[in-house]
């Protein structure tokens, strides 16, 4: 029996479980020469998938209605007629939300579950780690002694960005939505300071207090009013890495913010949209550095693991409530 | 008799003549060894001076109350005890709004009125030309075949940006506020298309019509709703040069715009604040290229010349009504 999650309809505003439909087929998948049969082991849910559920123009194509939803998936090869893969191998790649599926192996990466837990290949050893490392370095160009603010700091990418920035000698300030997360930023991830945007009476002033010398780099995962507050604190030649805008992804009206242009002119500041796939040629170098830091125990990570294929949509929706700490993963 | 214009009080919203005070002193200026006596010939009025009238933190210090206002000035050396300058020389530099003043020569550039009209050293052969050339090239990185939109296109900087972009093989669309200006963009400056933001019913749609392949570069002099409209038309890897935001300089409340972050992420786009003084090491190269193009008649320019020292404040204020075509200059 094969279960598939397809896009039932496009969300208006916040996604709901009714946007997804579970299709169950009582059949046996077969493979042809060159193909492999995969069984899903771990499924990644990520904020950017919200964009693919819409039909607006974007950097990756929209999901089609009544077609399987896709994301980063770790799967086990349960049968192979492809010389590059053996039964029992684990692979990582963009795959369907499907308990079993057939692939020709294209775009799949073999991963080694003995070196690191399988799920980390969706997180710190996968797109999460690459996004944090490359976004920070390629756009942020961090220098020791500078100050960085990270929004969505307790999330998958944010918690890695903060740790890398610490390794590189920066003062690191994280913004997150609960006191528990702020505590985790400081004790587990070594951030210098944390601001709870749900209890702060004045985020702009709190950033100023935490960053008396101003903000040189802003790693932005959230957009909206939190990002507005950072603007008032940026230094000359500041770099603002726009990695995501989870706070406005579900807006049904076009979100408004304070105009960034006067801040950018006054400070000769840079704001750049970051998409990790544009930096594919740097993946090997980045992965090598991340693995080294992991082995040296300079980097750590947190996962929020939800169990069961049927809970994929809920896990995804919970991202927008900030229910995850670190990387949100569904174990099948 | 020496006349000086000092900052009387700081404007709230749009500047008015009452922000300035004329001080008349019946005295003779004298010079010491190493000094020169200058008589103002041409005074530049520029939108960025609005920022210096406020006391908000910015990239250049605020004007002090009851002290002379400054801007780019062309002056004649009427007496010299400095070996680098002779009586009769003309110089360009940041000088007081003052009929006569004493200088030690620091920061002044000798200019040759026989090679080009003196006033052009405030415009296309001065900061205006440098801003256009360096902003476009250093941040915009234009490639032949691309499409650029220029706002404030009939202004001093905008009209030069459009012409340089044409020389470099781009499709050039200008946005300005009167039909007469749009006509000038197309006939005098060779723009491919122009949009009158005062009569357009839908600027976003009009940009789309003029730029069916999307916008690769946006040279932004204005900010506000015009810049919002451009965002809907940007291409992947677009570069947005934020050179000014004249449409919001006089706002008394913080201006709001649509949130740029989602557009930047979706398109891996870059937005960067540009201030010409950060690129001083490139001035000679830029000036050489601009002079060459001028000599080859590939570049032309327009000036709006106002007569009389007493009219400096009015000429400045008129910038915010778009009363200038090209560079606004006051002839003393």
Image (cartoon, coloured by chain):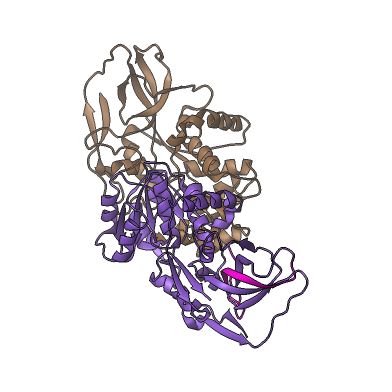
Chain colours: A brown, B purple
Q: Is residue B258 left or right of residue A10?
A: right
- Using the rendered image of the protein, determine whether residue A129 is visible from the camera's viewpoint: yes
Check residue B74 for magenta coloring. Answer: yes
Seen from the viewer's position, the closer of residues A261 and A175 is A261
Q: Position of residue B131 (x, y in %)?
A: 51, 56
Seen from the viewer's position, the closer of residues B239 and B104 is B104
- Using the rendered image of the protein, determine whether residue A189 is visible from the camera's viewpoint: no
Q: Is A177 drawn above or below residue B315 in the view shown? A: above
Q: Is A185 drawn above or below residue B160 in the view shown? A: above
Q: In percent of the image, x 46 and y 80: which residue is there?
A: B16
| Residue situated furthest bottom in the rendering | B26
Q: Magenta part of the protein: which range? A: B60-82
Say which quarter of the image contains residue B39.
Answer: bottom right
Q: In percent of the image, x 55 and y 52: which residue is there?
A: B287
Seen from the viewer's position, the closer of residues A84 and B24 is B24
Q: In percent of the image, x 30 and y 59: which residue is there?
A: B195
Q: Position of residue B161 (x, y in %)?
A: 43, 54
Q: Position of residue B147 (x, y in %)?
A: 36, 46
């Amino acid at each position: 029996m094969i279960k598939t999650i397809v896009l039932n309809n496009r969300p208006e505003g916040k996604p709901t479980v009714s946007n997804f439909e579970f299709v169950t087929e009582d059949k046996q998948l077969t493979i042809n020469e060159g193909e492999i049969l995969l069984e899903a082991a771990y499924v990644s849910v990520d904020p950017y998938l919200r964009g693919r559920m819409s039909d607006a123009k974007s950097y990756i194509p929209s999901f089609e209605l009544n077609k399987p939803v896709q994301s980063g998936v770790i799967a086990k090869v349960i049968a192979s007629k492809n010389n590059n893969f053996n039964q029992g191998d684990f692979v990582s790649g963009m795959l369907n939300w499907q308990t079993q599926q057939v692939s020709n192996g294209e775009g799949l990466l073999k991963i080694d579950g003995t070196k690191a837990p399988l799920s980390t290949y969706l997180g710190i050893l996968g797109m999460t780690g690459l996004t944090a490392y490359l976004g920070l370095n390629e756009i942020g160009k961090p220098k020791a002694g500078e100050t960085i603010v990270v929004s969505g700091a307790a999330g998958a990418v944010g918690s890695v960005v903060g740790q890398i920035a610490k390794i590189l000698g920066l003062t690191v300030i994280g913004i997150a939505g609960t006191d528990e997360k702020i505590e985790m930023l400081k004790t587990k991830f070594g951030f210098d300071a944390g601001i709870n945007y749900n209890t702060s009476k004045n985020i702009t002033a709190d950033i100023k207090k935490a960053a008396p010398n101003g903000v040189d780099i802003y790693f932005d995962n959230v957009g909206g009013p939190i990002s507005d507050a950072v603007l008032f604190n940026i230094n000359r030649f500041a770099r603002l890495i726009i990695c995501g805008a989870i706070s406005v992804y579900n807006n049904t009206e076009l979100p408004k913010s304070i105009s960034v242009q006067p801040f950018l002119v006054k400070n000769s500041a840079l704001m750049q949209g970051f998409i990790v796939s544009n930096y594919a040629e740097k993946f090997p170098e980045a992965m090598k550095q991340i693995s080294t830091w992991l082995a040296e125990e300079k980097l750590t990570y947190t996962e929020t693991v939800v169990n069961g294929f049927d809970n994929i949509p809920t896990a995804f929706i919970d991202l927008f409530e900030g229910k995850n700490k670190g990387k949100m993963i569904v174990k099948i």
